[in-house]
Image: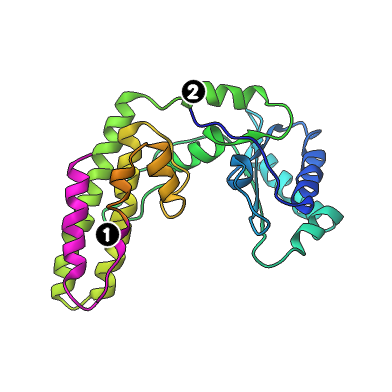
Amino acid sequence: MINYAISFPTKAHKEAAEAIKEYFQNIKNVDTILVVNSCARGQAVAGSDLDLAILAAQGTTSTEIGEMEAAWLAFAANSPALLTYQALGPHALLHLDLITGDYRPGPMETGGMPDSFEIEIGNQVRYSVPLGQAGPFFLDLRRRWLPYYDSALRSERLRMITQSCEYDLSCIRPYLERGLHFQAFDRLTVAFQKFLQALFISRRVYPIAYNKWIRMQVEVWLGMPDLYSKLPSILSVCNIESFETAEKAVLLKTLLDGI
């Protein structure tokens, strides 16, 4: 089990979070106020964003969500604590999402990007920490989605994402043969993220992202330091106007086959 505790890196982070809690805790359509991302994991630094998710109570309508969002924006524009936080600098951003807890996997388009199904459940359910009391809907979501979703859906997701990754890898050499070197490298980076998505699904572990915290997730969470040691070289290309990207695609395909 991976468990963390809330840690706010500055007084401004903490006071902004307290102002948000005070604002939302008495709204009837709010089930749980959640701290997410680095502050929830105790890994935030002074320049980190402040990320929260407000889980709406079951039965809250889209109209009510819209009204809540409009009221929140009006409050945030004049809150001293939030204005103080925003004055920390351009890279300390406040992200607050109103969420419904309705997690549904979608179809993956051929050549498209990885979807956010597992990432949303990971960040909002698995690794989030309630700021105050956990509501009944949040507790229901944890019972439903943890430790992982059902085997039938997992098998289908793993098949779909593996095939999508293989398709991306199959495009790289033809792109290079047409002189589309940057497009080939772009397709390699997309395939790399789908590889990570398939890897996490195969291990029944929710991720937090496919483009950051890679070492921590693979080495520590998955317990696969040997695999991680092979990953940085996949996206390390010395000469993009060569067939080196195709060589990297072969390496990634080998890793994908080993999942």
The quarter of the image holding the C terminus is: top left
Q: Is residue 237 magenta?
A: yes
Quarter of the image holding residue 184?
bottom left
157 horizontally vs 146: left or right: left
Q: Nearer the viewer, residue 139 or 205?
A: 205
Between marks 1 and 2, how big is the CA–CA gap? 36 Å
Q: Which circle's residue, 1 or 2, is located before the other in the chain?
A: 2
Q: Position of residue 223 (x, y in %)?
A: 37, 36
Q: Amino acid at mark 1?
A: Ile
- Asked if 255 appears above or below 175 in the picture, the reply is above
Going 42% across and 37% down the picture, which residue do you hit?
221
Q: Residue at x 18, y 78 (%)?
A: 179
Q: Which residue is mark 2?
A: 144
Residue 249 shown left or right of residue 209 in the figure: left
Q: Is residue 68 left or right of residue 239?
A: right
Which span is picked out in magenta? Answer: 232-259
* Horizontal side, residue 211 vs residue 88: left or right: left
Q: Residue at x 24, y 75 (%)?
A: 181
The answer to whether one can see residue 108 in this image is: no
Residue holding disc 1:
234
